[in-house]
Image (cartoon, grey):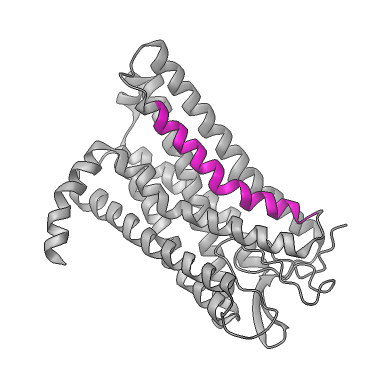
Amino acid sequence: MYSSTNHTEDDALISTDNYSDYPDYDPGNTSGPVVPTPESPALCTDVGCVLLATVNVIITVLGITGNGLVIWIAGFKIKKTVNTVWYLSLAVSDFLFCAFLPLSVAYIVKNTWVFGRFMCKFTYFFWFLNWFSSIFLLVIISVDRCVVVMFPVWAQNKRSIRRALVIVLLAWIVSALLSLPAAIFRDVDNIYYDSLVCYYNYTHDDEDIAVRVCRFIFGFVIPLLIIMFCYFLIIRKLKSNHMARSNKPFRVMTVLIVAFFISWLPYHFFHILEISLKDPNVISIGQRFGSTLASTNSFMNPFLYAFMVKDFKRKCYALLPKIESTF
């Protein structure tokens, strides 16, 4: 039976869910970047802790580098089109997420939240804002590709940079609304020994369940179904009209769907599972693994999307000698 009390953590670094029932338990509700186990105030020394910190550092470096390159190319080096608006917006979202990951690394290493209550609320709100916006932009890119293939004439007449910017703005607004629970319910408390934790301080169990289910539906199920449906229509159109000269487009679309599914399923699975499962070790390990895997999506997106586009690849190859000479 699920007991939450009013200290439930559903995402981001650490969860104090059920801490009254398990005084030595850190559910590790890592709904954003991952967090340490606050069983003691000691610094990060064990293998698992070091591995988590190392993976987050790698994600940060690769994410900032890859997305920064996309921002540079899409923002300054190639002609502005609807596609560049999508890729630039996606890169900005992932770049900002990765830029805040060092806070997660500090949390893991120090095993205590040292940034205060405001930063606890703001950081997690910001993480989820960029996470949701990244997911919604992947959906927008998929729908746009489907429209271009299915209705090429209409797309040529109606697609415009201005409309693309409006759609991106709406995606960010919806993302902000879905991220509000992090700003409203996040709190800082001295629960485990001398370690401060940044956790969800829900008033009722129903609030916790509602947030988890809402994120699962709007952050995974609906986006995945839309992406799969769009690529199904594209593949059927290409095959029926013999428009694809090779199997590469089909392989690419398969990779995109599989990457999204693998990145996000473990995260949502373990956060939904926590509602009914009362095994703290399974939940803690699963949520940390799921959150880390979900974070990798932020540095994979540039390679899965932007760098597959010919204009991006040509410009990137042209810039590599300049980058090399600079270093």
- Whether 38 is drawn above or below 208: the answer is below
Q: Residue at x 33, y 19 (%)?
A: 244
Instruction: Indicate whether residue 257 is drawn in magenta.
Output: yes
- Above or below residue 112? Residue 176 is above
Query: Where is residue 284, by image quadrant?
Result: bottom right
Q: Residue 4 versus residue 261: which sits nearer the camera? A: 261
Residue 234: x, y in percent?
A: 43, 23
Provide the major secondary structure of the magenta segment: helix
Q: Nearer the viewer, residue 15 or 159?
A: 15
Q: Residue furthest front?
A: 47
Q: Which residues are magenta?
A: 250-275
Residue 109 placement (x, y as % from top left)? 53, 78
- Would residue 144 be seen by someone viewing this image from the given angle? no
Quadrant (top left, top right, bottom left, bottom right) of the C terminus: bottom left
Please give the name of the residue rendered at 46% of the width and 72% of the height, measured from the top-left corner: 102
Query: Would residue 254 be counted in the magenta stretch?
Result: yes
Left or right of residue 200: residue 59? left
Residue 126 percent coordinates (x, y): 51, 63
Is residue 258 among the parts visible in the rendering? Answer: yes
